[in-house]
Amino acid sequence: MTHPPHWRQRLTAAATAASTLALTLTLLAGMPYVLWRATGVPWPDHVSSLHEFAQRLAQPVSDPLMIDLLAVVGWVCWAAFATSVVRETIWYTTHLPQLIRNRHAHHEHVATLSTKGSLAALCIGTLVLALIGLCRPQPADAQQLPFAGELRAHITATAPLTPHSATQSTRPSDAATVPAQVMTGWHSPAPSKPHGQTQEVRHIDYTVLEGDTLWDIAHQHLGDGINWPRIYALNKDRVQNDGTRLTDPDLIRPGWQLTIPVTQATTPKPHAPAPSNPAPDTTPTSPTETPPPPSNSHRQSDAGPTQTDTDAPAETSRPSESTAPKADTKAGPAAISLGAASLIGITAAAGLLAARRYWYWHQRRLQEPDREPGAPALSPLVDKAAQAAHAATQPRRPQDPDALITRRTPPRPPQPSHAVAIGVQDDAEVLLDELATPAGCAWTGPGAEGAARALLVGILTAAERQRPRPPHITAIVPEDLADTLLPGLPAQFTALTQSADLAHAIQVAEQHLIAHARTQDEHDTAPPTAGPANTDPAGQTGPGTLLLLAVPDAAHTGQLQALATRTRPETLIVLTLGAALPGAARWHIDVDGTTTPGQGASPLRLFHLTPEAGRDMIDVLLTAHGQRPRLRILPIPSQPANSKHPDPPVEPVPDDPPARPHPVETSRPTQNKPVRLHVLGPITLYARGNPDPIGTNLRSEVHEFLALLAAHPTGLLASDIADKLHLAPGSDQNALKNLRRAVRRALRGATGITAQEFILLQGELHKLHPDLVETDLADFTRCLKEAFSAPSNPETHNASLSAVRDALTHYRGPFAQGSDYLWADTIREHLVTQATDATLRLARQAERADATPRERDEALRLLEHLATFHPDHERLAQHAIRLYQAAGRHDAARHTYSRLENHLADLGLAPEPATQALVRSRNQAQKMR
């Protein structure tokens, strides 16, 4: 009787378990029984003291004494073995989950033991592995596989991962005409499947790679690792290319060819049965008759490779050559939730993203190196909105079937820079022109105030996207209403103007209509060849769109109503809160922003903000324009920057050419660990003993993963990594396994270290192995800590200068330079602040009257090194100008100022008066001469 393969595996496992258990019990119980029956207790009964024992040893050696000594040795060996059995039983019990996933853990454990300790480990480990193999369930739909000898009769060639249809001809004539084709044997369909479905087994040939296990291969291709006995049974008698056979399921070698059975259900077509002797058919099989790919192929197209955490590469499973990458057509959300009571659109978020760049720049300008702790952090709400806008503005790329991770579906792209969105309807943003009804629009209900606040923020953020051009959409709001919605704003701030009262607001709106009429008249009377003047981003000319937001009162209702009748898209919009004008559209807004614009229209959800969320956004917008937020007091210098350190008297010395100081050496420091990771500047990997970078062919997501771990040396939880990498929900575990595998494969190949992991996984915590991987970021932080750990005084100045110079040798550029990661901006700005603070402290010391020329030159070298990467940093330029002037190198000082001025002009900014005064005073002195 022939047993199915999985039953043969069960019988083998049962026999192994029984024989191992018998051997272990024999050694534990049989050995002491034999010793006791043969020699008894070796300790003499009549010896009652140590003196008598010494006398006994002094007697001549006799045969009974020799037997007793040998018995003692036997009892000691048995006790040592019993102790080892107890110890190994505890070890295998605690590591049982790991053994279930990876049986190589048993061999690795035995290899670490001594010879005397390995016997117990072999007995207990073999028993545990046999029980694991015996208790593993078999899939209910497993098919009986052919013997390997029967299968090999049908195979003429193999290729890695080449699936073949069950309908392929296996006739000898076909094999002769196509000798290079893989011919496989197939089982007949199982007739017991209901509804006409049958099971057909097709085989694919797989080439074993470094680190593969049967469990991983079964998990990848058969859907579950517990199906590994099917692969083992099919290949255990197959002669491999190196002349060996698969005899141990825990040992497979790279380069071996394994045949993998893939079972799939098919429904036969209702056609007439074929004749018993059909004519040879040489017509190629239609593509539509090709069986579908394996059952896990959907994971490759949607979520990347789905392999367990082994060294098997993610590229082991490739899509068919006929499958072309398709563009990602999934539509993301158009709104961003900021807590339970706030909602903004992706267009407003794009404006916050634009303002964030200016926010960082002004924080650098306000930052003083002696003040701790650095610049304040960006509001979490604003940071979340900016990251969502960052993801939305990235170019849409085709789906990469080889990607190691799957990102979340990004939000919809924002509207054009001049547009303002008021809400979302049918998962698409609704623009401001929706409010341009003939008699105006009125918002009432508990959510009206929050929606109006979000509307004004949307107008202000749209202005940020158009900087330095004037905004296309502006708003006029009475001062009392503006102070209720957005307190702390100045009377005139970018696109928002606050009027003294409602009458003044109506007057401004009327002047806006007159300006529109004048512009239209000029356009109509202009010669046909003349192009329109003052064209804005929307392709319109003139002053743009004005929103009048007010609460009607009895004294001005008539004027407001007359103005509302002139409402037109792209010209004027009149919106009232609380009370409605006669004939105006009434929108009742719920607390969550939901409203229905008209009869039969689908619900519209207006964007809305709480007062706290609105305050956070206004603080960011104010700081982005160099103005102090009302509720965040930031210390600023009370004197001009040059008043504390006046320029020395101008000496009648001819100007030197603008010579630059020698740059800071940035050669790669001595590497003490097997792997060195550079994240300050472009992300680069080095292996000890190899001057050239390694891992240059790694995918961008692997570099991002390494940079994220380098920025968090104490480790990150899996959930935090998934959030920062924007991994798709449900794919984080698989994605992290693929990332760890890619890092392991690259670094093991470069260093030859295979016994340790370069990324430690402690539960859900991921971190770089501190003994195997070193980073320039850690060295940079350590040097800065050493530079200012001691009090500042002339005695420690040289040590601080040397430590800062060492720190800046590691600073080859901003964090992850050249990479546009969503999470890196905050870390990048923090490191910039650390580097500039340290340099500015030394620059201040070099500006002392008793400073030596060497100290000035060293400070200038550090300032110029940082200015290479941050040419728009005004504090660096100020100190460099003063030091150049103190050294009499006025051309270099003017060059530094011109460089700063040009870079700020690209941002629509200008140097502050204190910086301008540094150069102006020198120019005036030259004119007086």
Image (cartoon, rainbow, N blue to C red):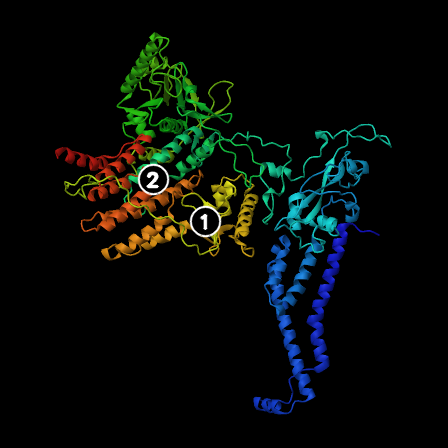
Q: Residue at x 66, y 52 (%)?
A: 253
Q: On screen, 800 above or below 830?
A: below
Crowd around label 2: few <14 · some 14–19 · many ≥20 (10 Å) = some
Based on the displayed image, in which of its 4 quarters is residue 378 positioned?
A: top left
Q: Quadrant of the C terminus?
A: top left
> Which x, y percent locates residue 920?
19, 34
Label disc, if present, on residue 870 of the rendered structure: 2
Sequence-first tag of 1 and 2: 1
> Given the current orientation, which residue lies at the most extreme right position?
276
Helix, strand or loop status at disc 2 = loop
Crowd around label 1: few <14 · some 14–19 · many ≥20 (10 Å) = many
In the image, 401: left or right of 438?
right
Q: On screen, 521 above or below 656?
A: above
Question: Which residue is at the front of the view, 906 or 686?
Answer: 686
Residue type for callout 1: Leu
Based on the displayed image, in which of its 4 quarters is residue 918 positioned?
A: top left
Residue picked out by circle 1: 677
Q: On screen, 122 above or below 580?
A: below
In the image, 862: left or right of 128?
left
Q: Residue at x 14, y 42 (%)?
A: 649
